[in-house]
Image (spheres, rainbow, N blue to C red):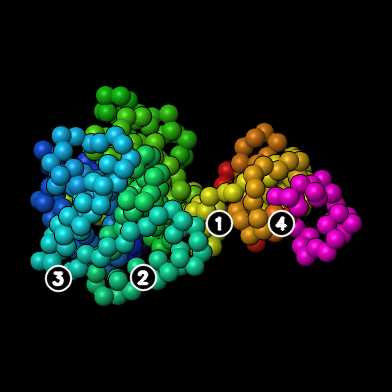
Amino acid sequence: MSRQQRKALMSRVRSVVVKLGSNVLADETGLLGREQIRSIAGQVTALGQRGLQVVIVSSGAIAAGIGELELPGRPQALPHLQACASVGQSKLMMMFDAAFRPHGRHAAQILLVRDDMEDRTRYLNIRNCITALQDYGAVPIVNENDTVSVDEIRFGENDVLAAMVTNLLRADLLALLTTVDGVFRDTGRTDRFDVVEDMTEVAAAADQTRSSLGAGGMPTKLEAAGMVVAAGEMAAIANGRTPNILTDLVAGEPVGTLFVPTAGKMNARSRWIGLTRRPRGKVRIDAGAADAVRSRKSLLASGITGVEGDFARGDVVAIVGPDGVTIAQGLTNYGAEDVEKIKGLRTSRFAAVLGDYQYDEVVHADNLVLTG
């Protein structure tokens, strides 16, 4: 893609979520680097002066705690990692606030766990809070609540959290800043993917190594990028240590690897159902039902062949085709026990099996989101 085409894409961007990895923020000693945080703050301010809204999702609490506690390295035991996060989170926020104050901005801390994103009321409250902070000119700094969250510490969940925040806000761009210049086709990192329209194209090139301070790697960044692209927005993986990387990226310069969507934008509710909530179980369907679901028709019990998990009415379930591949997620009108009773049956037989019933569809088309 030409520079002109990149510039045209970026000219539409009005809101950005920036994810910062621990190694991006660390200095040569492995501790949080004030100059690097000041650089990020300056770039975020520059984007704000252009009229863009920016939210930061930042790792670094554990790294900050390791430095404050003067530990020789990253602990292995979960309680010790959580203790480092507890000590380091306040340090991290103080450094961000100090970096933004010369620009007349405040840093605002938002700590989340996965359940906050899956509960619909809390999910919407998070969006409302971020919007209010931006009205005040504050910069929201989001982080996983490492002191109570197991998944983030073990699996680099902040990449996925950043994608969820992007979809929550319907932001136009997710910038995943790491310590490499993008995604490369070769192990020597000389042949960089510039613009990607097909996520499967880069899957085999993912670097499986983990960073020394963080918990993620290229696979989680590609997962995060995929979640955003599926919702109809852009994502980029770029080197956060490169000077002016954010401003150059948004200006359309050929930096990093840019992922662009090929489908239209999902509405806010569909993003929550299909890309945020974890399925509580699986509903297996036959080929005819799979064709209907792919055509965005409701899922009827007659096409269901199997049920897995213990889910309740209103939970999200994965809808799995006969080949074992998940093709959609949706809000179920029936719990697992009732679905087991009515699977394979026509709606006319529901009353005899269930007694009183309310819904003809197991998953209504309005509550179904294609994911495959």
- Among numbered discs 4 and 2, the one appearing first in the sequence: 2
| Depth check, front residue: 106 or 7 | 106
Disc 2 marks which residue? Answer: 129
Instruction: Please name the amino acid that badge 4 sits on.
Output: Tyr
Residue 202 image position (x, y, % from top left): 41, 34
Q: How many marks?
A: 4
Residue 273 badge = 1
Residue 297 image position (x, y, % from top left): 71, 55
Residue 313 image position (x, y, % from top left): 67, 58
Q: For the residue labelled by badge 3, is the local secondary structure a helix, a strand or a loop?
A: loop
**CA–CA distance in space, label 1 to label 4:** 16 Å
Residue ID at (40%, 71%): 128
Disc 4 marks which residue? Answer: 334
Instruction: Please name the amino acid that badge 3 sits on.
Output: Gly
**CA–CA distance in space, label 3 to label 1:** 38 Å
Q: Is residue 168 above or below residue 285?
A: below
Residue 255 appears anywhere in the view:
no
Is 264 on the left-hand or right-hand side of 176?
right
Residue ID at (45%, 39%): 199
- Among numbered discs 4 and 3, the one appearing first in the sequence: 3
Is 372 on the left-hand or right-hand side of 250?
right
Residue ID at (21%, 51%): 87
- The magenta region covers 336-361
- Camera-side mark, 3 or 2: 2
Q: Is residue 57 magenta?
A: no
- Among numbered discs 1 and 2, the one appearing first in the sequence: 2
Instruction: Please name the amino acid that badge 1 sits on.
Output: Ile
Q: Are marks 1 and 4 in contact (CB under 8 Å)?
A: no
- Among numbered discs 3 and 2, the one appearing first in the sequence: 3
Disc 3 marks which residue? Answer: 104
